[in-house]
Amino acid sequence: MMSLAAAVAAGGYFYLNPKLPSIEGLSNVQLQVPLRIYSSDGALMGEFGEKRRTPKKLEEIPELMRQAFLSAEDDRFFEHPGVDYQGILRAVVNLLLTGERGQGGSTITMQLARNFYLSSEKTYLRKLNEILLALKIERELEKEKILELYLNKIYLGNRSYGVAAAAQTYYGVGLDELTLAQIAMIAGLPKAPSTFNPIVNPDRATIRRDYVLSRMHQLAFISTAEFEEQRKAPVTARRHRSAIGVYAPYVNEMARAEIVKQFGDEAYVRGLNVYTTINKRLQQAANDSIWNGLVAYDQRHGYRGVIRHVDLESMGTQESVTNVDEDSEGSQPALVDILKDDQNYGRFVPALILSVNDDISSDVAAENTEVAGNAAEAVSIEKRSATALLKDGNTVRIPWSGIQWAREYISVNRIGNELQKVSDVIKPGDVVWLGNDPVKGWSLGQVPEVQGALVSVKPNTGGIQALSGGLDFEHSKFNRVVQAKRQAGSGFKPIIYAAALDKKYTPASLINDAPVVFEDSALEGQWRPENYSGKTFGPTRLREALYKSRNLVSIRILRDVGLKHATQYAKNFGLDSNELRYDLSLALGSAELSPLQMARVYSVFANGGYLTEPYLIQRIEDADGSVLYEADPAVACTSCVIAEQRWSNKIVEDDSLVKLPKQAERTLEPRLAFQMNSILQDVVLRGTGRRAMSLGRKDLAGKTGTTNDQRDAWFNGYNPDLVTTMWIGFDQLKPLGSKETGSSAALPVWIDFMRTALAGKPERQLPPPEGLVTMKINAETGRAATDADTNTVFEIFRKENVPTAGSASSVERPAGGEDAVAIPEQVF
């Protein structure tokens, strides 16, 4: 009989063994690891892939974690040859006694074989294949390697594969931060990840956890005191996302699309790590500025109403509602259920208004006290408030200061009267949005209908530092930074003015700011353009016309230099001349461009005349850290030009010059670029961008932009190290409101962002190129000043374009004399 059994076993072995899969590559297996997107400073921004996995070396996995899995799954792992015959015997006995197949005897090596090569169905043939594979694995791999593969491969529920992913998913921490009770909870999952899921089934998970702890105690991996203490630990598991270092969903999607284009669907499983050019600090600033700026715009235009109203009396809850304390925890389940289907929107949370306090008698009492007037007023105002219930069952107090903004929305240009009482706007039973400011506390909220986009780039390289394509990615994945083409408004004018300087114009050239009527077939008949103010100002210097954004001057300049020259000149800023409108409305910004295109345009001014290419992906690494791609952008820097010339002439004094970056094409004459930079600095110093002076810097420049009926509001601004474009508008091309211009709507958001972006950064000016002259001129005529002139200003000229002397004392040379001097390195 024994001989027959042996013969059968031998026959089975020789029959199945040739059919077993090769395990040659198991020791170098490529685990399915998701695609991860990082900032330039290593902060995780996003993760793409069905399986969450973070592979770890065995020595990186805490010893207690290893011991917990051995205790729960295979305490004789280091003793058996891959198959635990004692366990198999137990399974056979169970079969004979019950007639049912059980799971007995499945070692860690057998589980590894099943996970890599076999199905999980319970058949005798599969089990036999599993045994043979396990024996084969043990012959070819060290025990430590097998355990490492297992702890990285095993499925632990909630899309988590491996212990590191499970630690993050259930507890939001790394392996080294887990408690013993948490380790035991994870180690109990392989048997049945769904049944013992601590989030879904905490009671059953606790039983399994305590079993693992008892096994660890029995095997002397933990002491009695540790066992008793840890089994009393509460279940702390909850669903965590990956430890995101900075929120950048629009960036993630851009990077993901590019990576998938290069690597196909394999990108989701091969463990690619993509490092972008994004700066974590600046990206967070962009997120904050966009949200705060769009909410501020929305609140300026009034409150459109609550989400919905619930009749609390009909639910029989009104009496209990009045007894709910402010800032309390827990409330009636019926009330919480009202909010069960309401999800957060960005930074707003849904809430149910429970009560309102309209008592203003304290206002009068406060006025009659001896308390200082302002303090008394503050106390009295804050008496008016509302109490609201959150989804988690907590109640919060909304002070009057967080409610009084909510005057009724009537139209985009009109709001209702100032509120006197809380009940003027909300009442018990209203479901509303709430925001929570760490300083100001809770406030009534409203999801803005308006949208915005912000992008910030390094002008010398094109590296994108921060990007936000809208208010909230979860509700609108349309990336307005790259996908929205909107009229640029006056932000396009610097291109026209640069084209004029390329011709016969100087910053002092006089152009008549006067009414004009055009018969233009391209514009379908008669056109009567106006300045934004509706006024005209007569002869105006080119510099002043740009920093004050005079429309009529811009049109006359474009008509004079010609559409052909202007549209061809736009190529110097990376624009396709065929995509620009070929009529005089181009002078007012009828060109439809994306915010990223505008940032590229202003990078040319910021870097001294070089055309750089915006880019997002800096480096791509494989799962093992090998570099698959490294960006090599063409850069704009004078020192690089000098170094390149020295190298080409074989005059090399430093070996470090051998590896020079690629030089970006210089598309603007350097002196012209300097003149334009000076004029755009005047936009901030004394023009439509004056609000930016609140940053207290002298190296800022830029241009506002507003389109017809205030449908778009822009600010494109920079210093030599950072270019930032901010756009605000409705996706449906509706007016923003008569007072919502580039300077009032977009510029404050730009300022908010740049305040953080430039904090601690020294001021920096572009160095003046050779061949420039600064000269005192008559501010009214633009000609060289005479001794008799009283209204004079300094202006910058290319030396061949110095205006005619107004008197013998005027000198037309680069240096010498009071009226003509070489350009120093300060701003004019």
Image (cartoon, rainbow, N blue to C red):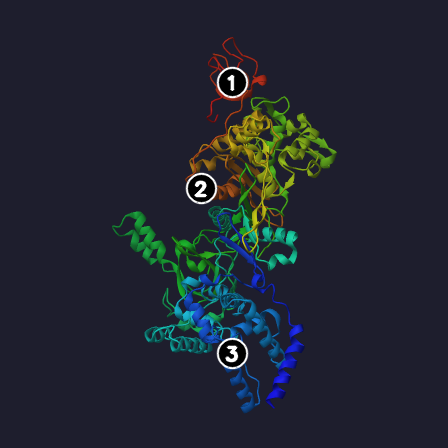
Of the numbered discs 3 and 1, the one sitting upstream in the chain is: 3
Of the numbered discs 3 and 2, the one sitting upstream in the chain is: 3
Residue under the point 73% across and 37% down: 524
Residue 702 visible somewhere in the drawing: yes
Query: Circle 3 is placed at which residue position?
Result: 84
Q: Nearer the viewer, residue 294 or 18?
A: 18
Residue situated furthest right in the rendering: 521
Label 3, label 1: how many angstroms apart (C-alpha)? 97 Å
Residue situated furthest left in the rendering: 370
Q: Amino acid at mark 2?
A: Arg
Of the numbered discs 1 and 2, the one sitting upstream in the chain is: 2
Q: Amino acid at mark 3?
A: Asp
Mark closer to the observer (3, 2): 3
Query: Circle 2 is placed at which residue position?
Result: 755
Query: Circle 1 is placed at which residue position?
Result: 777
Mark closer to the observer (3, 1): 3
Residue 240 drawn at (x, y percent): 48, 63
Which of the 4 quarters of the picture holds residue 219? Answer: bottom left
Residue 790 drawn at (x, y percent): 46, 17
Tell me: 392 left or right of 129. left
Q: Check whether the beta carbons of the residues at disc 3 and disc 2 lie within 8 A of each other.
A: no
Specify few, some or many for label 2: CA neighbours under 10 Å numbering under 14, 14-19, or 20 or more: some
Q: Secondary structure at mark 2?
A: helix
Q: Nearer the viewer, residue 742 or 316?
A: 742
Q: Secondary structure at mark 1?
A: strand
Label 3, label 2: how many angstroms apart (C-alpha)? 66 Å
Which of the 4 quarters of the picture holds residue 443? Answer: bottom left
